[in-house]
Amino acid sequence: MRPKVSVKLMREVLFRIIVSVDSVNRERYPKLAYRFFVWAGQQEGYRHNTSTYNLVMKVFAQCGEVKAMWRLFEEMAEKGLPVSARTFHLLICASGQVGLRRRLVERFIKSSTFRYRSFRNAFNAILHTLLTIEQYSLIEWVHQKMIFEGHSPDVLTYNIVMRAKYMLGKLDQFHRLLDEMGKNELMPDLHTYNLLLHALGKGDKPLAALNLLNYMSDVGCVPNVLHFTNLIDGLGRAGNLEACNYFFDEMLKKGCEPDVVCYTVMIASYVAAGEFEEAQRYFDDMLVRGQLPNVYTYNSMIRGLCTAGEFDKAFSMLKEMESHGCTPNFSVYSSLVSRLRNAGKDSQANNVIQCMTDKGHYLHLLSRFEGYERC
């Protein structure tokens, strides 16, 4: 008895293919997925929707089959199927050339079947997707096109374009957009303030940041842990640890409970400055307050221990994070191995690699450890 084809069945089968793709089967699986896709589309009472097309595109994307993705996109257009922000995301990530990406943007802008859901218009949906994949120059181009075609930007538009300008180091244009936003009588939201606080922090302007925090409270936009964290992150990158500590205390005074991300930012800032004792103090305080360290917290602490020459403690912390159910990422292993080798402790470095392989972690990345031979 054949199973009845449904969207649910399609999702289950295609998702299993997606999570199973590796270097061995990446040539075979796209063909397998497409044959199943074609067969399912021929079954009585079933029609593919946007979601199933996107899943097959995801298989193609993971296997580098860009032309096949575009053929599916054209097929969707021929059948009049709606395309989604997810469709755009898959295609834009796979399309490496700038010219191809611009052509894709223009197709989606002009598409009458583009379903951009919660976004005000197609431009905002596209801009948001481009922000998630850090295509800042392309964001500038889309924004220019948006203005040229007579569309008025809203707060979301400004937030995205300002973020792009900031990341590109175009601070004059960043501030011009902020002024323009005010002239257009658009009120900053929590995300706008978040970006401004980070910029002030990284620019080492703690007094201006304090004034902005007070202004936020005055206008009813109460700063939360995310705002303080982004400010502290910026100040930490600027090397102003005194200001980091001040705003951390201010956050506590305002009844704002620091989370694991905030603690990790504080720890990383002190580790980067070579002040491991302070980093340890924040790590201990974090545990007392019931916040569980994540992989980035442990990575910072292990890096700090290595810098302090406490290699045995660093290895112990690696084991500790595993016992607490926090699986180290490859960066944790490679960072520890690199620092051990730089200190002339090749035997201990090999023990770390052996620990990684014994647990079956990142075996496909073993070749990155130069000179290591698996037993």
Image: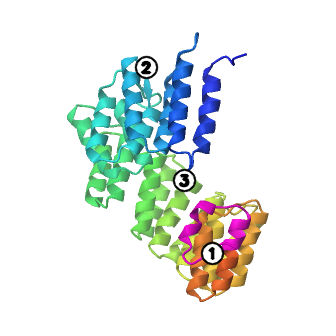
Residue that carries the numbered disc 2 in the rendered image? 81
Amino acid at pointer 1: Glu
Which residues lie in the magenta part?
Answer: 353-375
Residue that carries the numbered disc 1 in the rendered image? 373
Q: Residue at x 63, y 62 (%)?
A: 363
Residue at the left extreme of this rendering:
148
> Which numbered disc, 1 or 3, marks the residue that appears first in the sequence?
3
Tell me where residue 52 appears, x and y as whole percent. Answer: 53, 27
Q: CA distance from mark 1 to mark 3?
A: 52 Å
> Which numbered disc, 2 or 1, marks the residue that appears first in the sequence?
2
Bin the neighbour count of mark 1 within 10 Å (Cα to Cα): few under 14, some 14-19, many 20 and up.
Answer: few
Q: Residue at x 41, y 47 (%)?
A: 131
User: Vertically, is 347 above or below 116?
Assistant: below
Q: Identify the disc placed on residue 303.
A: none
Dot 1: element: loop
> Which numbered disc, 2 or 3, marks the residue that appears first in the sequence?
2
Residue that carries the numbered disc 3 in the rendered image? 223
Residue mark closest to the camera, 2 vs 3: 2
Kindly check if marks 2 and 3 are in contact, taking CB atoms under 8 A apart as contact: no
Q: Residue at x 64, y 24 (%)?
A: 8
